[in-house]
Image (cartoon, rainbow, N blue to C red):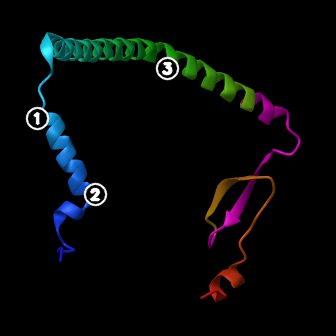
Amino acid sequence: MTDPNDPRRNAAWHAAQQWRARTRQTPRGPLGGLKLILTWLLFGMLLIIGTVLGLFFLLIGWAMLPIMRYRMKKRLEQMRAEQASDVGTSFHYRETHYRTGTGGDSHREQQVLEGDYEVREDEHKNSP
């Protein structure tokens, strides 16, 4: 009777054995060694080309940073100028000044957008 835990019955074990058999085989003839050398040379060249291209694009990106910063700064200034002109002509936007009493005669001026708000002393004191 065969052992159910025998590793030779396992499909992964068979696949590993096939891989071992393939790695033990040497390249046949002079073309096998030549193919191996050419493969490594091609792989090395691709690595070098990829590294050079990566460094090239990195340098281009660094060179473009000041230009992009200048453009973004100009765009931000333009947006601020447009918002400032919109604020001055808008009907719904207004600043109101009012004085709130904080106790006694001490008053301080505050700016509130779109309306006057005040805090009632009796509701403020009664809240927990």
Query: Mark on residue 63?
Result: none
SS for callout 2: helix
Three-letter amino acid code at the position of disc 2: Ala
Three-letter amino acid code at the position of disc 1: Arg
Residue 89 shown left or right of residue 70 in the figure: right
- As drawn, the residue found furthest toward the right would be 91
Give the residue number, with chain letter if any, for mark 3. Answer: 69
Give the residue number, with chain letter if any, for mark 2. Answer: 11
Spot occupied by residue 71 in the image (x, y as percentages of width and height):
56, 17
Q: How many marks?
A: 3
Q: Quadrant of the C terminus?
A: bottom right
Q: Which dot, 1 or 3, sits closer to the camera?
A: 1
Residues at marks 2 and 3, CA–CA distance in whole angstroms? 60 Å
Three-letter amino acid code at the position of disc 3: Arg
Vertical relation: 44 (above or below) 97: above
SS for callout 3: helix
